Image (cartoon, grey):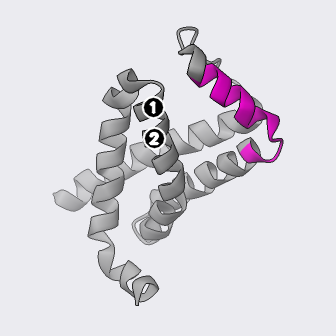
């Protein structure tokens, strides 16, 4: 039962990151109109670095695809970890109201990392 729940959550998590990554390339989701001014400045500055958003988008799509199957989930979690840290820090500093969405994502991500901790042991040693 636990594995089925983890698969469903991983599927949703992966699809959310695939969607976010594809949006970086095709820009089909408009930015919310009620974004804080400071966050708009930060996002505008990040957009000025031409290679940054495509790189983040590529990491999100690749990580999201790898996060879905259980065989590659540990690798997907590692690829998405820096992106997730950025999401958490951005919400903490500029848009704390977004934690209603970020907290469950972070919980799923940490659950996958903990479930796959034996696969990461070789990297730490």
- Residue located beneath label 1 in the image: 93
In the rendered image, the vertical position of residue 101 relative to residue 56, given as above or below: above
- Residue located beneath label 2 in the image: 89
Crowdedness of circle 2 by 10 Å Cα count: few (<14), some, many (20+)? few
Q: CA distance from mark 2 to mark 1?
A: 6 Å
Residue 1 location, x and y as percent?
16, 57
Q: Quarter of the image holding residue 42?
A: top right
Residue 82 location, x and y as percent?
52, 55
Q: Is residue 8 visible?
A: no
Q: Quarter of the image holding residue 65?
A: bottom right
Query: Which range of residues does the magenta coloring cover?
Result: 39-52
Determine whether, in the image, residue 54 is placed left or right of residue 71.
right
Q: Secondary structure at mark 1?
A: helix
State the residue lying farthest toward the left: 1
Q: Which numbered disc covers residue 44? A: none
Which of 34 and 92 lies nearest the eye of the viewer?
92
Residue 25 location, x and y as percent?
75, 38
**Residue shown at 81% from the left, 34% from the top:** 48
In the rendered image, the vertical position of residue 37 relative to residue 94, given as above or below: above
In the rendered image, the vertical position of residue 88 relative to residue 2, given as above or below: above
Is there CB contact under 8 Å for labels 2 and 1?
yes
**Residue shown at 39% from the left, 79% from the top:** 120
Which of 72 and 37 lies nearest the eye of the viewer?
37
Residue 107 location, x and y as percent?
29, 48
């Amino acid at each position: 039962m636990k594995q089925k729940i983890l698969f469903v959550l991983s599927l949703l998590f992966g699809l959310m990151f695939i969607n976010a990554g594809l949006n970086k390339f095709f820009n089909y989701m408009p930015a919310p109109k009620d974004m804080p001014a400071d966050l708009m400045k930060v996002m505008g500055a990040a957009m000025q670095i031409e290679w940054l958003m495509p790189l983040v988008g590529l990491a999100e799509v690749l990580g999201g695809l790898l996060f879905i199957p259980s065989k590659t989930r540990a690798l997907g979690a590692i690829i998405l970890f820096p992106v997730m840290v950025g999401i958490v820090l951005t919400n903490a500093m500029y848009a704390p109201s977004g934690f209603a969405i970020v907290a469950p994502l972070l919980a799923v991500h940490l659950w996958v990392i903990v479930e796959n901790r034996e696969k990461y042991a070789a990297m730490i040693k």
